[in-house]
Amino acid sequence: MENSNFIANTVHEIRTPVQTIIGTLELLSDTKLNTEQTEYVRQIRFGADVLLTLVNDILDFSKIHSNNFSLENIPYDVVSLTEQTAYLESIEAFNKNIELVTDIDYSIPPLVMGDPTRVKQILLNIIKNAIKFTSDGYIHVELSSKHKNMLLSQITDTGIGIPTDKVDKIFSSYYQADTSTSRKYGGTGLGLNICKQLVELMNGNIHVQSEKGKGTIFSFNIWAELPEEE
């Protein structure tokens, strides 16, 4: 417990200056810079974003493994949340000439019970990964209902894929299928482990199908009850 508190407090202290660096870089980007200076700013921003992601992942990891972690259970619009999350990442996909499309079952009830912040976190993590490891083609985000109280989300990409013999390990803490990807793309492998634990806390499960060079399909289902009628 003491270790968890120490990690959480330390990470908070690290996150503040990192956010200051990112904010200052955004201001710097709006000034008159030559091509060389713009590239330096881009590289610093890339490193700061990677560091901020790592800090946030460590904080979530420590929270989940502490006794203080709990999920919200409030009404939210899962259809709108899925659309908005995909839209948030559509610019990044557009910048890489990747098509990001959504395929949503609109018969899903307008409100379900759950933790919208954590559902969004899972979606963002998987969609960001899909964009990161896809250089051409598309990303397909699907939301459907397996039955009344079980929601299924599936994210398909045409990216670099995962070797078949390493697919089963992809949700392990700090695991990466190829260490060279962390040098090229950044990341620690913590994000997918956090997704797995969050999905399981929501009484669901998460799966991955992939083949190297042929893309990846991440799918997860979560239990989502309907709110009580007033």
Image (cartoon, rainbow, N blue to C red):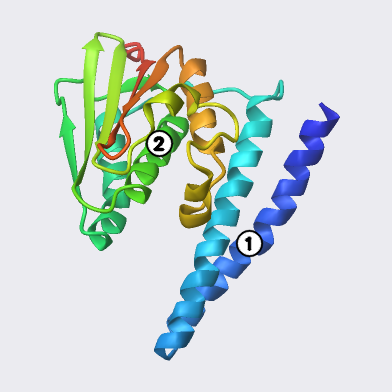
- Left/right placement of residue 103 relative to residue 186 reads left
x, y (%) of residue 26? 48, 73
Residue sitting at x 61%, y 35%:
60
Which residue is label 2 attached to? 120
Query: Quadrant location of the C terminus?
Result: top left
In the image, residue 46 sits, relative to residue 11, either above or below, namely below
Give the Cα distance between marks 1 and 2.
Answer: 23 Å
- Left/right placement of residue 25 relative to residue 92 reads right
Which residue is label 1 attached to? 18
Which SS class for mark 1?
helix
x, y (%) of residue 80? 26, 36
The reply to whether residue 109 is in sight is: no
Q: Earlier in the sequence, mark 1 or mark 2?
A: 1
Indicate which disc residue 27 carries.
none
- Crowdedness near tag 1: few (<14), some (14–19) or many (≥20) residues, C-alpha within 10 Å: some
In the image, residue 226 sits, relative to residue 139, either above or below, namely above
Q: Image quarter for residue 15?
A: bottom right
Q: Amino acid at mark 2?
A: Lys
